[in-house]
Image: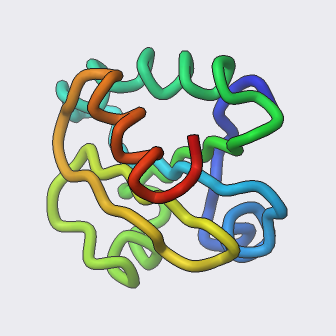
Amino acid sequence: MATPFAVTEADFDEKVLKNPLPVLVDFWATWCGPCRMIAPLVEELAKDLDGKLAVGKVDVDTSPAIAEKYGIQSIPTLLIFKGGTLAKTVVGYIPKPEIVKALNEAGVA
């Protein structure tokens, strides 16, 4: 998918944990300024790595159980899953090259 897809509590396992591709999950909220700043970078990565990486977005206000399960206390938080397992966590706004570095460290990009 060349654009990020919404992930909810109902479909998290299917879209993220069972996804054959590595998945970058952006935990965000509409009221979060840094979340709005990182969103275009996440969208660019979805396009740049189309076919190599799936990109999902979890609204912490509408899906708080997922955020709680993964200990999300600050947003934006990016979680990188590989083979259904959490491989890397990035908390806060970071520039695109730093996100790519985190993906590389997780063995994704």
The answer to whether 11 is drawn above or below residue 107 in the figure is: below
Q: Residue at x 27, y 52 (%)?
A: 90
Residue 54 at what x, y percent from top left?
70, 44
Front-lying residue, 10 or 34: 34
Residue 75 at what x, y percent from top left?
22, 49
The answer to whether 59 is drawn above or below residue 42 in the figure is: below
The quadrant holding residue 18 is: bottom right
Q: Quadrant of the C terminus?
A: top right
Say how the picture is coloured. Answer: rainbow
Q: Quadrant of the N terminus?
A: top right
Residue 25 relative to residue 15: left or right: left
The quadrant holding residue 99 is: top left
Residue 61 at what x, y percent from top left?
37, 56
Residue 68 relative to residue 62: left or right: left
Q: Residue at x 56, y 65 (%)?
A: 81
Q: Residue furthest bottom?
A: 69
Q: Residue at x 69, y 42 (%)?
A: 53
Q: Residue at x 48, y 74 (%)?
A: 86
Front-lying residue, 92 or 22: 22
The answer to whether 65 is drawn above or below residue 38 in the figure is: below
Residue 97 at what x, y percent from top left?
32, 23
Front-lying residue, 63 or 46: 46
The quadrant holding residue 45 is: top right
Residue 40 relative to residue 55: left or right: left
Front-lying residue, 53 or 57: 53
Residue 86 relative to residue 1: left or right: left
How many marks on residues? 0
